[in-house]
Image (spheres, rainbow, N blue to C red):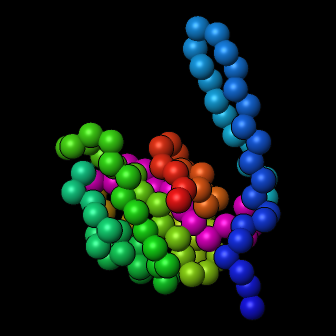
Amino acid sequence: HSTSSFKSASCAALEFSGPFRVSFYIMGDLSNCDQIWIGGLPPETDDAFLRGIFGAYGEIVWCKTLRKDPGQKCSALVQFGDVQDAQFCANNLNGNRAEGLDEPIKVKLSPPNSGGGGGGGGG
C-alpha cells in the first residue's frame, strides 16, 4: 500500500532582489508525481468540465480550477489516482489539444501544494 505523502519532489526556491523580483524553483525527481497543472483552458472551465475532459485519461482524485480574471483563460490542478496517468498527460498533452478542447493547452507535472504554473496554495 502507498501513502499520499510526496517525498521524492524536493523543491528549492531561489530569490533575487533588486529592481525586479525573480523567483524560480528547482524541481527534484517528479517520477512519483500524480498531479498536473494545466494552462490555457477556456474561461468557462469549472471542476465538472475538468472531470469531463481529463477523466478520459484516468481516475481523478480531485481537481481545482484556478481563475485570474473573468473572461480570461484559466488554469487548473488535477490529481490522478495513478502516477502513470498524470505522467501520460504531461508527456502527451502539453502543447496539444485534448479531446473536447478547441485550442492547445499547457500541461506539466506539479508536486502537491506547489501551485503549478502560478498562484495556488495548500491547505
Q: Residue furthest bottom?
A: 1
For the record, the magenta segment spans 30-42
**Residue, x 64% and y 10% (percent of image)?**
18
Q: Is residue 57 visible?
A: no
Q: Is residue 57 above or below residue 97?
A: below
Q: Is 43 on the left-hand or right-hand side of 55?
A: left
Confirm whether the magenta stretch covers residue 100.
no
Residue 86: percent from left, percent from top: 58, 70
Relative image position of residue 114 (x, y in whole percent): 60, 51
The extreme top residue here reads: 19
Percent across and percent down for residue 48 are 29, 73
Q: Residue at x 47, y 44 (%)?
A: 119
- Residue 96 versus residue 80 in the image, above or below: above
Instruction: State the residue at coordinates (48%, 67%).
Output: 78
One can see residue 23 in this view = yes
Q: How many marks?
A: 0
Q: Nearer the viewer, residue 11 or 108?
A: 11
| Quadrant containing the N terminus in the rendered view | bottom right
Q: Does residue 43 appear left or right of residue 57 in this picture?
A: left
Viewer-proximal residue, 73 or 11? 11
**Which residue is the extreme one toward the front?**
123
Position of 1 compared to 116: left or right?
right
Q: Is residue 83 above or below residue 19?
A: below
Task: In this rendered view, identify the residue nearer to me: 32 or 16.
Answer: 16
Residue 81: image location, x then y, percent? 57, 81
Q: Residue at x 34, y 54 (%)?
A: 41
Name the quadrant containing residue 122: bottom right
Apparent side of residue 70 relative to residue 113 in the rendered image (left or right) = left
